[in-house]
Each structure stands twice: as structure tokens, then as C-alpha cells.
Image: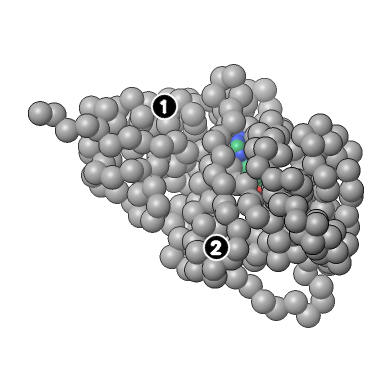
Amino acid sequence: MLILHTPQQMRTQSAAWRAAGETIALVPTMGALHDGHASLLRGGRERAARLVASIFANPTQFGPQEDFSKYPRPLNADLGVCRDCGCDAVFVPTADAIYPPGDQTVVEVTELSRPLCGTFRPGHFRGVATVVYKLLQLVAPDCALFGEKDYQQLQVINQMVRDLWLPVTIIPMPIIREPDGLAMSSRNRYLSPEERRQATAIPQALQQIVVLAAQTRDAARLVAAGRELLASAGIQHIDYLEIVDATSLAALTHLDRPARACIAAHIGTTRLIDNVAVAVPTPLC
Ligand code: AMP
């Protein structure tokens, strides 16, 4: 497995594979890899001749008060996961390599970056779109895999790829969960044992919404039920709990099209996000 540090090394390697007629899959990550990341890597392994993982905690997608400096960076363990999942190369650039002095170009997906996390993390999706665009330029993959765990991010990337005619197929991958339902996340390691127990209310609230959605199309009722469950678990700091259109992310009042229930909540000092597909109830005859 190659470990590549500079954009030039990454470009040269990718060009050599392409010249040999080999396809490339890319899995962008920020490191602290878990089974969610591993499922993306295995998905990429199946889809292309060459598999590249990138490990880069991207400073431009963190706000000034966020956890960039304490974000976990267990590089050796991460390289082990990449090796086990059959990566051909891991791209581990420095921040200066990705944003050299004088860098001033950004990519902004306007509408889709505004709701949900965009409201609470201004500039976050500009940072995400910009770094993903740069990684796609350097790796030139045939496909890139992204988890539905970061559902808004996935929609932002899809929109960017469409709008800029980027020659890559984006593959969405399902959310991998712990046995008790908590979505795997690099940030779960910040949780104390008590907070970890409390955090299971997040997937439980989403499940409650899925079950209730079979009985009502009223999004406000679904949201109220989810909020009640979070409150009963002692989760008070909720950034949002919304039912949104699965593609446009516009808030729905009525469940009349493919929808997604999305939550961002703080457990102690840790901010967690999760989401689930909500089926439209079948009409009664
Ligand atoms: P991150 O390292 O958090 O930036 O995540 C890198 C990629 O892994 C993103 O496409 C995430 O959506 C995806 N990912 C993170 N956690 C999970 C999970 N529990 N299940 C599936 N994909 C995930």
C-alpha cells in the first residue's frame, strides 16, 4: 500500500493507473476510521481496480469554536484499516499542501448548504465542497463513495458534481450502526459511558418517527414525537430535528414525497448527527 503525501505524488500515481487503463475508486475521510469508513472502503474495493483512501482533517470545514484541534488522528491504526480493506494508496496530505499560501478559490453549493447543519455551521459545506473538489481533481477517480450518515454532505456533493459536470460517479453508502443503533462516528469516542447511553435516544427517536410515519402524514406530529423521546432521555440541546425532502432538503409539513428525518443534537460537548429515510404512507383505498 502506497502512502502518498503530496498532491504531485497523488496526481502522478493516479495518472499512471489511468494510463494503464485501470479504474479508480476514492473514499475521502478525515481519519479516526471505524467500521462505517471500512464499509465505504470495501464498497470501493468491489467497484474499481484501484482503491484510494484520503485521510485529511480538513480545517476549512470546522468553525472557530469546533473540535478541529482535538479531532482524533490515530494515523497508524487508520493505515491498518486501509490495508485490511485493500487500499492501493492512502493520500495523507498536510493542510499546507491542500491550501498552499495564496490559495483563494472556493466551491460553494448555495441552496443545499443553507438548511440543517448549514444554519449551525456557517461555512462548513463550503469547506467540504472545496476540499472534495480538490481531492477529485488530484485523484481523478471513476467513482467516489460517501456515507448517508452525512446526508446533507452527500446531497451537496451530488449537486456539485452535477453543476460542474465532474466526470465521477458518486456512490451513496448506508449508515453503519453500533449494535444498539447509534450511528458510528469518529466523534463517539468523545462520549463518557453515561453520554454514550444517552446518545442511543437519537436513533431511537428516528425509529419512532419511521414507525409513526405509517400512521400520519403530519410532519409536525412526527417531529413532536421525536423531540419528546429526546427530551425524555435528557437531551436538551437539539440543533434541529426536521423532516425534509430527501433531495432538496426543504422542510416538509406534509409527508407526501420521499423524505428524510434528520437530527443534530449535543450530548455534553459532543455534537452528533443522524438521519433516516421516511417512507411515504401508502394511501388507503
Ligand atoms: P468523516 O471521516 O467523518 O469525514 O467521514 C468520511 C466518510 O465516511 C463520509 O462519507 C461519511 O459519511 C462516511 N461515514 C462516517 N460514518 C459513517 C457511518 N456510520 N456509516 C456509513 N458511512 C459513514
SS at mark 1 in the image: helix
Query: Mark 2 is on which residue type?
Result: Val
Q: Which mark is residue 161?
A: 2
Q: Is residue 106 visible?
A: yes
Sequence-wise, which precedes: disc 2 or disc 1? Answer: 2
**Residue sitting at 63 percent across and 73 percent down?**
106
**Residue sitting at 82 percent across and 45 percent down?**
88
Count of labels in the image: 2
Toward the front, the furthest residue is 21
* Quarter occupied by residue 103: bottom right
* Quarter occupied by residue 141: bottom right
Q: Which mark is residue 207?
A: 1
Please provide percent x and percent y for residue 91.
82, 53
Please provide percent x and percent y for residue 278.
36, 36
Look at the picture and state if 138 lies above or below 142.
below
SS at mark 2 in the image: helix
**Residue sitting at 76 percent across and 59 percent down?**
18
Query: Mark 1 is on which residue type?
Result: Gln
